[in-house]
Image: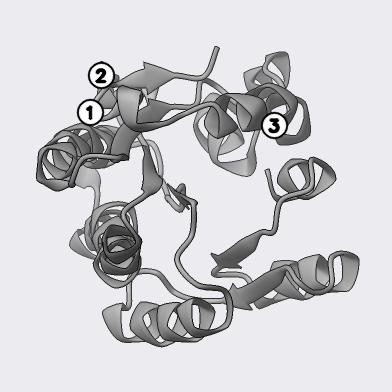
Amino acid sequence: MAEEFIRLGHTVLGCARSAKSIAELRGRFGKPHDFEAVDVASDEKVRAWAGRVLKSHGAPDLLLNNAAIINKNAPVWKVGAEQFDQVIDVNIKGVANVIRHFVPAMIERGSGVIVNFSSGWGRSTDAEVAPYCATKWAMEGLTQALAQELPAGMAAIPLNPGVINTEMLQSCFGGSASAYPTAKEWAKRAVPFLLSLGPKHNGQSLTVP
């Protein structure tokens, strides 16, 4: 997504948990773009990152919460407490942390779109991914409630991105993940769709076409 947004002329400010990936992005895309290694599960670290970004660039027009992890395939009673907590901490608390520290500036400005990435498993379920399903169903509820709280002129949207061939998909689909589009292929469709979202979409559960 970062590459496609930048290709279309937009400034991208992003974070990821991998310092190596962030270094690669910094090497490819210099200023005004900005990338930082941040653990979104940490409210303190998100607060510090948001404070720096808001000071240097102002409130974002489009806030994308797409950080997520998935449990190893297993019945829910076999998913250990530590792994379950990690999925909850990143997929739900991470989104809440980003909202907490960016959305007030967007509200103060009076405009902006918040997209919280849901999933097909946020509107249906499957065996052995119960923790992940729980977090993505949570995205639907959290985002629709947020949509009711925002002032006119803004939008919060739970978005099902569709099925994408990523490391996460490979972890649960195995070799069959290759039947689905790569992240780069997907971004060609998804980024223009994301840029088309506005206040009229507030609270709607949408899917990338």
- SS of the residue under disc 2: loop
Asked whether, in this view, residue 69 is left or right of residue 110, the answer is right
Q: How far is the residue under mark 2 from the one under mark 3?
A: 22 Å
Asked whether, in this view, residue 1 is left or right of residue 26, the answer is left
The amino acid type, in three-letter code, at marker 1 is Gly
Which residue position is annotated with label 2?
Answer: 123
| Quarter where residue 185 is shown | top right
Q: Residue furthest right?
A: 28
Across and down, in percent, residue 47 comes to 34, 82
Indicate the colouring scheme. Answer: one colour
One can see residue 83 in this view:
no
Mark with earlier residue (3, 1): 3
Above or below, comparing residue 109 to residue 192 in the picture: below
| Quarter where residue 109 is shown | bottom left
Across and down, in percent, residue 103 comes to 30, 61
Q: Nearer the viewer, residue 206 or 147?
A: 147
- SS of the residue under disc 3: helix
Across and down, in percent, residue 153 comes to 29, 40
Q: Which dot, 3 or 1, sits closer to the camera?
A: 1
Q: Nearer the viewer, residue 168 or 24?
A: 24
- SS of the residue under disc 1: loop
Q: Which residue is drawn at 66% across and 72% down?
A: 35
Tell me if mark 1 has few (under 14), some (14-19) or many (20+) residues whose alpha carbon lies within 10 angstroms of its own: some
Q: Which residue is drawn at 80% across and 74% down?
A: 31
Q: Which dot, 1 or 2, sits closer to the camera?
A: 1
Which residue position is annotated with label 1?
Answer: 203
Q: Residue 187 carries which label?
A: 3
Q: How far is the residue under mark 3 from the one under mark 1?
A: 23 Å
The amino acid type, in three-letter code, at marker 2 is Arg
The amino acid type, in three-letter code, at marker 3 is Ala
Tell me the quarter of the image containing the C terminus.
top right
